[in-house]
Image (cartoon, rainbow, N blue to C red):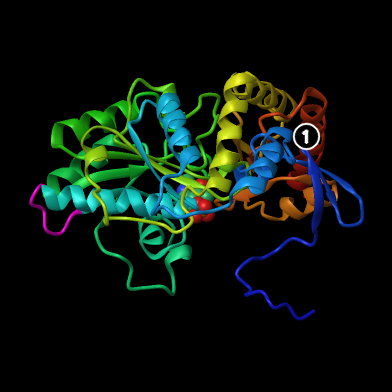
Amino acid sequence: MTSFIMPTYARLPVTFAKGEGAWLWDDHGNRYLDALAGISVCNLGHAHPAVHQAICEQSAKLLHTSNLYGVANQEQLAEHLCRLSGMENVFFSNSGAEANEAAIKLARKYGHQKGVDRPAIIVMEKSFHGRTLATLSATGNAKIQQGFEPLVEGFIRVAYNDSAAVERAIQCNPNIVAILLEPVQGEGGINIPGAQYLEQIRALCDQHGLLMMLDEIQSGMGRTGKFLAFQHSSIKPDVCTLAKALGNGVPIGACLTRGQAAQLFSAGNHGSTFGGNPLACSAALAVLKTLEDANIIQSAQTKGDVICSKLQSQLQSNPHIKEIRHLGLMIGIELDKPCAELVKQSLEQHLLINVTNDTVIRLLPPLIIDEQQIELLVSTLVQLIQKFTEE
Ligand SMILES: *Cc1c(COP(=O)(O)O)cnc(C)c1O
């Protein structure tokens, strides 16, 4: 079949027509359990009534004016985000990559203010920060960069979860002005760093006058059992980026700052036509209100524990399971062999999952997944894994 869409995606053979909560229905009316939530986008599930109502009401009033004018619900959203995160101000974008672009520009501006002419940012192996030129250059995955050289310069790569490696890089390079990392790596295989890692990075940033920049695009918005994953630690970053679940499916991203980082941009330094427009902000405000009211974030922690302890006990005799790890509902099941085929096998069982970094089954179910759906998720997945690893 000829497609008029550029072949940038290896699409699975299914098309969804509607959703409700953690359920999706394809265009033939078959029902699926969604344990991926559009890669941690629809954290409140599909067709959430509060989001639906907010965007309906907003679209009847005003979709877009311009950032040339005041945008009332953008102000409200920024305030709400700062209150939940402990950050001080916000730049709104339309996507995660754009939120990270803002962070990268902030780091460069910070460097120039300090008299560093060629500022550099420490980034991590196995990181993912997006597909624009700067963010793919920051990303720690050769497959994503290949064919798009020359990459944007000014990124120094070190091993993740290794603060000594960060310290060595800082000592070797006087141009370093910032560190950009995910508090839990998503695309890289659900990699959860040691308990003190963020504190150690914070201490190095303070000691050397660097900006600590956290990419919470996948880990944020309640996914790990806190509003933001860094809130499991005692630190605050200088810059924090959000997108994905911020609009529960309506495109919106945000770059949050505090302290010195909050004073770097002035009028004309950055901008976006759509960023933070009334429609997107109405969705994000509905998401924040729902997350705050309904104890959903707290439940992500317990549901993650339940899913993983069930998986642990039912898979404990399987020697091909290397590790089951999770923070809240950000779950990785690492096998001892590549397992990309499981995605399609799982789809055939009407369960949506994902495999990342070749060997890691990734689960990012909507935070509102219920007990029966958890049972179905675990039993379907365990059967699939047992069969797959026997082969
Ligand atoms: C998805 C993701 C991005 C990119 O977001 P887009 O909206 O696709 O540009 C960046 N960083 C992380 C950690 C992500 O998971």
User: What amino acid is found at the position of numbered circle 1 in the picture?
Assistant: Leu
Judge by depth and name the residue closer to the eye, 173 or 164. Answer: 173
Which residue lies at the image location 92% right of the left edge and 51% below the top edge?
29
What predominant SS class does the magenta segment belong to? loop
Can you say which quadrant of the picture contains the N terminus?
bottom right
Please state the horizontal and vertical placement of residue 195, each as a whole percent of the image.
39, 24
Disc 1 crowd rating (10 Å Cα; few below 14, some 14-19, many 20+) is: many
Q: Residue at x 53, y 42 (%)?
A: 281
Q: Position of residue 104 (x, y in %)?
A: 31, 52
Residue that appears at 30% across and 26% down: 199
Spot the residue most to the bottom: 2
Name the residue beneath numbered marker 1.
377
Query: Do we see residue 187 in this rendering?
Result: no
Residue 383 painted magenta: no
Q: Is residue 85 above or below residue 390?
A: above
Which SS class for mark 1? helix
Q: Nearer the viewer, residue 128 or 104?
A: 104
Q: Which residues fall within the magenta stretch? A: 114-119
